[in-house]
Amino acid sequence: MAKKLTYEELEQRVKELDKEAVEHRRMENSFREFCEIGKALSMERKIDKLLPVIMTGLSKVLEADRSTLFLVPWDQLTLWTRFAEGLDGESISLDLKMGLAGVCALTKEIVNIANAYEDPRFNRETDSVTGFRTESVLCAPLVNKLEGVIGVLELLNSKTGVFSREDEEKAFKSAALLADIDFSDDAQKGRANALVDDIRQATECQRGCVFLLNKEKGELRSVIGQGLGDREIRLSLSLGIAGLVAVTGEELNIQDAYADSRFDKSTDERTGYRTRDLLCVPIKNQSGDIIGVIEAINKKNGTFTGRDLDLLKGLSSQVAMFIENAILANDYHVQFMSILEVLAASIDAKDPLTANHSQKVNEYATGIARELGFREADIEILSVSALLHDYGKLGTNENILKKPGKLSPQEYEHIKQHAKNTRDILSRMYLIRQYRNVPLIASSHHERLDGSGYFQGLRDHEIHFMAKIIAVADVFDALTAKRHYRDALSSEAAFEILEQGIGTQFDENIVEALKKYWEKQRSQQIASTG
């Protein structure tokens, strides 16, 4: 016979059951959050849309105020924020040897700190830059399949005060999920390859190819060709099955390619591949115009059927949407950059001696960025900033700009105003989210590490890193070009001046990157002329 519980014992048992129910609901909600994250991982292909979903979800699951995803370019020994919750898309670069995230990357181990400011390894500079007060910290390494650390997941300020062992396990599993994501900027190509995979699976063929039509050149160019590596194939519209489909707009199902007189064998001869049978359908845009063709080559079992043809025609609409979006995005980008180049040229035209200055600064700045391992998306932001860095000179007196002798103190103060003018003008322009930091970057190219620059007198970490790059590129072009007050200097003399300014005016890594870029360009010129 069961023991009869007293009222107090019964009350205590109810409390325990209630506590267990609360914990069960918390675990259930946590599991549901992880399921949502997993669902996002499987459905969303665009990494820039995917990351905010994942990271904010992780913050919720782990009950943290903020989450940050760092990537580690080991050749630079830095940490780059691929996503930083609360920073509104701003990217931060940190020295790998400083801070708790760096410790996590270097040791490949979980870091769990209850009070950051009591830990000597904590880098307080990040808080001073972001305005955020860090208390508790949990870091987990992103380890790839080769057992290398590619990044760090960082959670800040647990709502319970400290991160638990359970939180560590969740962070570790989350980091493993993140390590499987492709963080490259080639998302569009990845999506296209995924579509070709769909084609191969649906039609059970060995290869799938997507060709883009160029009417002006009368050819088809392969944009996706699985099994071709990096090789690009160009086909004449007057030859072959693909050309015929592009011209007529009619799909073709060829059962025996070499028995068909319309088949062009030259592609097989170039690639070393033997085409047996193939399906080819036109890709049409929303207006019904042909913009390319899709080929499915060599059915794995038997020959292509009418069902395969219907499947390929259905998938062609998805491919058409991808191509149209890519073309539209490219057109907008080309238009945007051409407008910027015209704006930059209008500034350079104020003085014949500075003609093409903005373009040269852009060339050097982007060259430096590539040497430093910047992502193409960030290089794009830098390029726009470099092209517009002198836009404030619209308000500068031309007589002072062209003055051959030394400037008076008043004239120099007038010249210095162009940096502030650049920010004021660009801040009034409508810039999409990607370029919102352009006014700040472009207007900070005269700031110096020691705080002696203008127009704000910023120091070291207060200066945007991209502005530091433009500063080096700007001075190098100015030194190696003729000016009203002196002749052009040699590149060797210009680099000597840049080296003298390292630590006070210029960042050493940036100067070294420019040297590497310059030497590569010179070697290529020698090779091309030799």
Image (cartoon, rainbow, N blue to C red):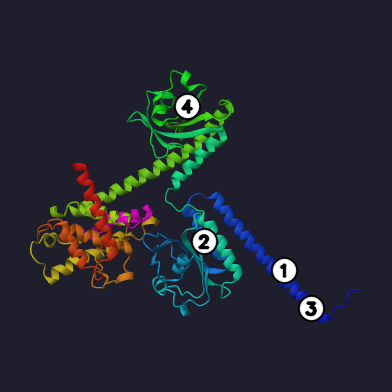
Quadrant for the N terminus in the image: bottom right
Residue 501 vs 254, above or below: the answer is: below
Could you give the CA–CA distance between mark 2 and mark 3, rounded to whole angstroms? 41 Å
Question: Which residue sits at x=37%, y=44%?
Answer: 330
Start-end of magenta stretch: 371-394
Residue type, mark 1 in image: Ala
Of the two numbered discs 3 and 1 on the same chain, state the one appearing first in sequence.
Answer: 3
Could you give the CA–CA distance between mark 2 and mark 4, rounded to whole angstroms? 47 Å
Of the two numbered discs 2 and 1 on the same chain, state the one appearing first in sequence.
Answer: 1
Front-most of residues 356 and 146: 146
Could you give the CA–CA distance between mark 2 and mark 1, rounded to whole angstroms? 28 Å
Could one spot residue 115 in this view of the protein?
A: yes
Is 246 left or right of 451, judged from the image as shown? right
Give the main secondary structure, helix, strand or loop, of the magenta stretch.
helix
Question: Which residue sits at x=46%, y=65%?
Answer: 105
Residue 127 in the image: x percent, y percent?
A: 42, 73
Could you say whether the residue bearing mark 3 is in a helix, strand or loop?
helix
Instruction: Tell whether label 1 touches label 3 (CB within 8 Å).
Output: no
Residue type, mark 3 in image: Glu
Q: Which residue is mark 4?
A: 275
Q: Residues within 10 Å of mark 3 (few under 14, many from 20)?
A: few
